[in-house]
Amino acid sequence: MSESQENKFQERIDQGAKIEPRDWMPERYRKQLIRMISQHAHSEIVGMLPEGNWITRAPSLKRKKILLAKVQDEAGHGLYLYCAAETLGVDRRELIDQLHTGKAKYASIFNYPTLTWADIGVIGWLVDGAAIVNQTMLARCSYGPYSRAMIRICKEENFHKVQGFEIVATMAKGTAAQKKMVQDAVNRWWWPTLMMFGPHDSESANTPELMKWKVKTKSNDELRQRFVNLTVRQANAVGLSIPDPHLEYDPESDDWRFGEIDWEEFWNVIRGNGPCNRERLQTRREAHEEGAWVREAAEAYASKRKAEALKQPA
Amino acid sequence: MPDDYTPRMQDTQWPIWEVFLQSKTGSPHEHAGSLHAPDFESALENARDVYLRHGDPQTSIWVVESRYIRTVESEDNPEFFEYTKYNIYRHPQFYDVPRGKRTEIERKAIQNRG
């Protein structure tokens, strides 16, 4: 790659141009995007697991249907993203193998267990809420296929967030036991959700490069602050508290200042030692292997149809 | 993470299809995204599951196997797109012509109407 090509690429990025699959791009840009998009795709797929556990146990038929639709959406989002990654010259097969062998990462948040029904509400509200903040930024990313997938995903993700917040709001004004259950879920999910935005800007190795290329247009800390501001107000609206004694309003900046995140826990979960890392990966592998017959059947059916079509007189 | 795991079987890598949706009759079909499928019929069924799932109104859906799409990009091949530059006479603004004027008969009729 010549330096002038790289300069020309940077110029296009600076002018706000979108990069399309066939355009020249630095190898590092391609690599970073494959890493980010596939990690994102894996997160959608693994994200189905903690919620899938609750489909049969949802408290009403309406809640079952909603949760089923939400889990189906996550599968669809994974698919959009794997396809976006494939435009960069990798195979979906390769990406899925990387997930199953533990070579590729997915969002650390999905390594926490869903203990009660309230967790399903809180995941929708906090986890999907955090995802939207992040994805709204990524919808403006410089890589065309990723940006387009994100626009589609954001439209659907809002449903996830709102259905979660509605579960939370319903429980928060329910019986004392329900309120206690939902507060407990908030207490357990709050800090892991803040970790979803990644390390502090000063510790985030990839951020400067990604911002230079406009893959990201806001830093981890900016996004985290935005999420906290939005969420503190929503918690206030339903009368739940945020488990942070250092949470404090700063009238100067109109921001809610929050306490220090336990980064040791974050890195520990990333390294594979969260409460559910092994279980999630094992479930995922089994789902893939036990689902092999579906793929084989689809192929057999396709060849049967093809044979029948050939037999038909013209 | 245990890294002694090796996948027991390879995932099937079916061909990629491009999906186009039309949101109302008379509108163009717009590219919605891609998916994998073993044949036409399954591509259409998968496209319905993935891209019509949300229930936004759509009137028509197309699937095309990606390898059948050929492209030329202006950046790689500007000459290919040059053609249009020499076509300015296809635009009405290219011509300098007098404007229409009302006839005497019309003008009188309008005056009489008040």
Image (cartoon, coloured by chain):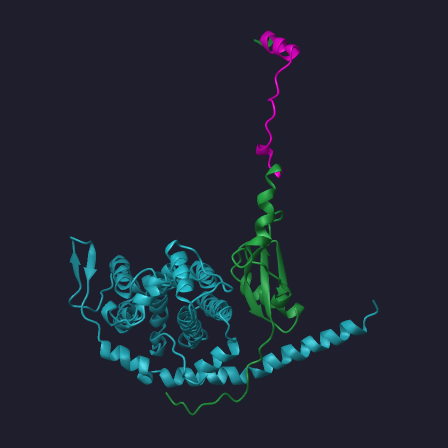
Chain colours: A cyan, B green
Q: Which of A277 and B83 is in front in this view?
A: B83
A64 versus B76 height, above or below: below
Q: Which of A167 and A122 is in front in this view?
A: A122
Left or right: A176, with B43 as reference point: left
- Residue A6 location, x and y as percent? 40, 64
Q: Residue reaching furthest bottom? A: B4
The residue under the point 21% across, 57% down is: A255
- Residue A92 location, x and y as percent? 51, 75
Q: Is residue A20 visible?
A: yes
Q: Can residue A170 be seen in this view?
A: no
Q: In the image, is residue B101 part of the stretch drawn in magenta?
A: yes
Q: Which of B3 and B97 is in front in this view?
A: B97
- Residue B101 location, x and y as percent? 61, 17
Left or right: A15, with A76 as reference point: left
Quarter of the C terminus of chain A within the rendering: bottom right
Residue A60 placement: quadrant = bottom left
Quarter of the N terminus of chain A within the rendering: bottom left
Residue A306 placement: quadrant = bottom right
- Residue A79 location, x and y as percent? 50, 70
The residue under the point 33% across, 62% down is: A212
A152 versus B14 height, above or below: above
The residue under the point 22% across, 75% down is: A262
* Magenta range: B90-112
Q: Nearer the viewer, residue B27 or A294?
A: B27
